[in-house]
Image: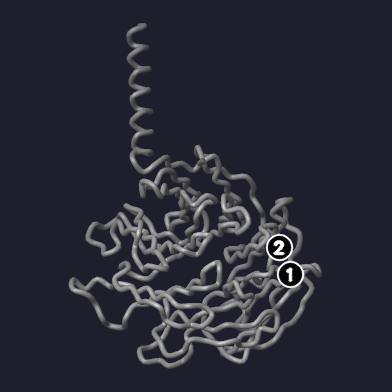
């Protein structure tokens, strides 16, 4: 009887070992519970029935604003107290629920800016003053319809957006800039190809964008992106890198000194014949224009990238609803947190004041995650 008990215990231990091995392997721990270095520290709740998958975090890291493309509410959360402190509305109109996903804090932290549609062609900018308890500063119609999908804050305290669709030969402006808080047009880039993604360096000296040429393929018909590096705000093209990756750029991240750009391409592990199969993230030296590091194999697309505080590690939020940690020294993934598969929309943001913290949204909840004890 004792021998049978020992045998059953041995089989159980072997089974557990096999399970743990299959979940960890060389790619790090995979879990939807707190892992060794990733933990959930708070859950913020929007009003019942309202989602908040469009998020922006105040430059101080103290506040988070969230909205969605399916309602007109904006929820303001205090990230220190970890609670909802205010609800404001973006506006109303026939086209509101189709085009109201733009929301951003200005880089000086004084204003919260939203864009919504009351007419089919031209957007309205709504601006609130943060220090005045989010009182309405202005609600003005834009002079142009830029067609961009989001608003982003630039280091020189403007906001910008870009057109994410264009026909070949289209000479309409592709990237628009607006002053804050007046929201007046403040320059644009026009006669060049429509970008897939755009980012401005933290020091405000560089802008990068990626694009793919219309109808032009490389040998093997794999569609490569090109990375353009511009001086900012002069908008002078410094360098164009060809064949940076296959497919559109999914996300970017900068080192704090603006010397290096991390490029996140689409990736998958489902189909070995896919041109996105196990693509690599690449680190580009902005001054020498060389690719100096790569991170692979990637099994999913990084919809958000970020360097952790000492920049030895990288974190990615992927389209598989995972939060991954990558080691720059080895170029490999060392840990993975798996979020529940709830709701159709999800998104994530890194806290600009505390890069170890990430806000992850799904349905009417925003999870605050913390990456700890890596050093």
- Disc number placed over residue 282 in the picture, else none: none
Judging depth in this view, the residue of 13 and 330 nearest the camera is 330
Looking at the picture, does residue 143 appear above or below residue 238? below
* Residue drawn where x is 50% and y is 49% of the image: 340
Residue 73, image quadrant: bottom right
Find disc 1 in the rendering and name its residue. Answer: 88
| Apparent side of residue 112 relative to residue 16 in the rendered image (left or right) | right
Q: Quadrant of the N terminus?
A: top left
Judging depth in this view, the residue of 201 and 348 nearest the camera is 201
The picture places residue 221, in percent across and down from the top left corner, at 21, 73
Check whether the beta carbons of the residues at disc 2 and disc 1 lie within 8 A of each other: yes
| Apparent side of residue 298 relative to residue 143 in the rendered image (left or right) | left
The picture places residue 83, in percent across and down from the top left corner, at 72, 53
* Residue drawn where x is 52% and y is 54% of the image: 342
- Disc number placed over residue 76 in the picture, else none: 2
The picture places residue 218, in percent across and down from the top left corner, at 22, 75
CA distance for labels 2 and 1: 8 Å
């Amino acid at each position: 009887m004792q021998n049978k008990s020992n045998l059953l215990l041995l089989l159980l231990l072997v089974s557990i070992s096999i399970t743990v091995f299959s979940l960890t392997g060389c790619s790090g721990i995979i879990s939807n519970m707190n892992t060794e270095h990733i933990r959930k520290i708070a859950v913020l709740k929007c009003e019942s029935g309202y989602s908040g998958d469009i998020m922006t975090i105040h430059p101080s890291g103290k506040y988070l604003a969230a909205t969605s493309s399916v309602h007109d509410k904006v929820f303001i959360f205090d990230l220190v107290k970890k609670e909802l402190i205010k609800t404001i509305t973006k506006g109303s109109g026939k086209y509101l629920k189709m085009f109201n996903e733009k929301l951003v804090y200005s880089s000086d932290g004084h204003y919260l800016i939203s864009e919504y549609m009351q007419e089919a062609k031209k957007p309205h900018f709504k601006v609130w003053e943060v220090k005045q308890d989010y009182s309405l500063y202005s609600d003005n119609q834009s002079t142009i319809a830029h067609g961009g999908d989001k608003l982003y804050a630039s280091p020189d305290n403007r906001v910008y957006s870009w057109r994410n669709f264009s026909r070949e030969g289209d000479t309409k402006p592709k990237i628009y800039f607006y002053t804050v808080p007046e929201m007046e047009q403040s320059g644009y880039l026009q006669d060049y190809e429509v970008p897939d993604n755009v980012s401005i360096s933290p020091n405000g000296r560089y802008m990068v964008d990626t694009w793919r040429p219309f109808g032009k393929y490389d040998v093997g018909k794999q569609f490569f992106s090109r990375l353009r590096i511009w001086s900012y705000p002069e908008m002078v093209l410094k360098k164009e890198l060809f064949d940076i990756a296959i497919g559109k750029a999914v996300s970017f991240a900068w080192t704090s000194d603006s010397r290096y750009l991390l490029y996140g391409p689409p990736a998958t592990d489902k189909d070995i014949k896919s041109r996105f199969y196990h693509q690599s993230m690449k680190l580009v030296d902005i001054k020498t224009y060389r690719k100096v590091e790569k991170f692979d194999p990637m099994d999913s697309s990084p919809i958000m990238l970020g360097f952790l505080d000492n920049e030895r590690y990288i974190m990615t939020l992927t389209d598989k609803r995972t939060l991954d940690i990558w080691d720059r020294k080895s170029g490999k993934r060392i840990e993975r947190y798996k979020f529940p598969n709830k709701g159709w929309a999800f998104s994530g943001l890194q806290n600009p004041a505390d890069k170890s913290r990430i806000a992850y949204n799904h349905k009417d909840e925003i999870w605050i995650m913390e990456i700890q004890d890596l050093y």
